Amino acid sequence: MAVRTIIASGGASLVPDVGSRALARYTLGAASRTKPRVLFVGTASGDDAGLVARFYETYGQLDCRPSHLPFFRRTPADLRALVLAQDVVHVGGGNTRSMLAVWREWGFGDALREAWTRGVVLCGSSAGSICWFAEGVTDSTEGDLLPIDCLGFLRGSNCPHYDGEAARRPTYQRLVASGALQAGYAADDGVGLHYRDDELHGVVSSRPGSTAYRVEPDGSGGMRETPLVATVLPAETTTADE
């Protein structure tokens, strides 16, 4: 039986200054073949051209075959076949609520779940991280950060940008303490939660000093935050150095 793999990153996984290529290289290493096929899904950003370009800039420097899936232009008719033909699916950040609504209309979540069970590696940051969990904390709506129900491939809740956005940490702690969100995992920018099947297999970081945290109720109306040990990924050289 294929190993079900998800690598959910705290944020900025396509931004060079937080080691995007290091995270991308690590993700490719989890794929089942050499020169894997990698599909970028930028629904949360409305298929923003700049984000698509950063995807190609990041993965184009690695030994893989990158492509992307548009939902806001002419969309491929057979999404299931497209996704099942991949080795890695990378979901970009943006508006999680809008992304999930578009996916529901197209039945894309079902295609992703089938691909996951067949061994396709699922990954992403921000919206592309929380979408895999039962619940998450999102800035999809103007104003305060709010809980959101997600795809539920993984148990519990998730919070990205734990060190990258000032409101994330206190809001996630409050929501978990109150029971508005299930216990779960938070990740700093540049940090990946690597799941094998339904369990957290390890934590990797492209930034020394950054990590992930287990956040859970403490049984007395508060919460308990436990830092996890992260493996620091080797620094990537620049193109000019290679």
Image: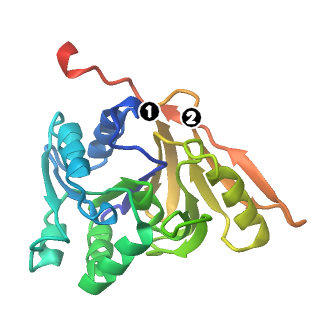
**Residue sitting at 32 percent across and 60 percent down?**
45
- Where is residue 54 drawn, in percent x and y? 24, 43
10 Å crowding of disc 2: few (<14), some (14-19), many (20+): many
- Where is residue 178 drawn, in percent x and y? 78, 70
**Residue sitting at 41 percent across and 65 percent down?**
95
Q: Secondary structure at mark 2?
A: loop
Mark 2 vs mark 1, CA separation in Å: 8 Å
Amino acid residing under circle 2: Ser
Above or below: residue 158 compared with residue 241? below
Apparent side of residue 111 relative to residue 159 in the rendered image (left or right):
left
- On residue 210, the disc is 2
Residue 242 in sight in this render: no
Which residue carries the number 1 mark?
A: 206
Q: Secondary structure at mark 1?
A: loop
Picture quarter with the C terminus? top left
Q: Quadrant of residue 155?
A: bottom right
**Residue sitting at 25 percent across and 77 percent down?**
111
Above or below: residue 51 compared with residue 182? above
Apparent side of residue 23 relative to residue 229 in the rendered image (left or right):
left
Above or below: residue 105 compared with residue 240? below
Query: Farthest residue in the top direction?
Result: 241
- On residue 138, the disc is none
10 Å crowding of disc 1: few (<14), some (14-19), many (20+): many
- Where is residue 137 drawn, in percent x and y? 57, 64
Q: Are marks 2 and 1 in contact (CB under 8 Å)?
A: yes
Depth check: 70 or 186 in front? 70
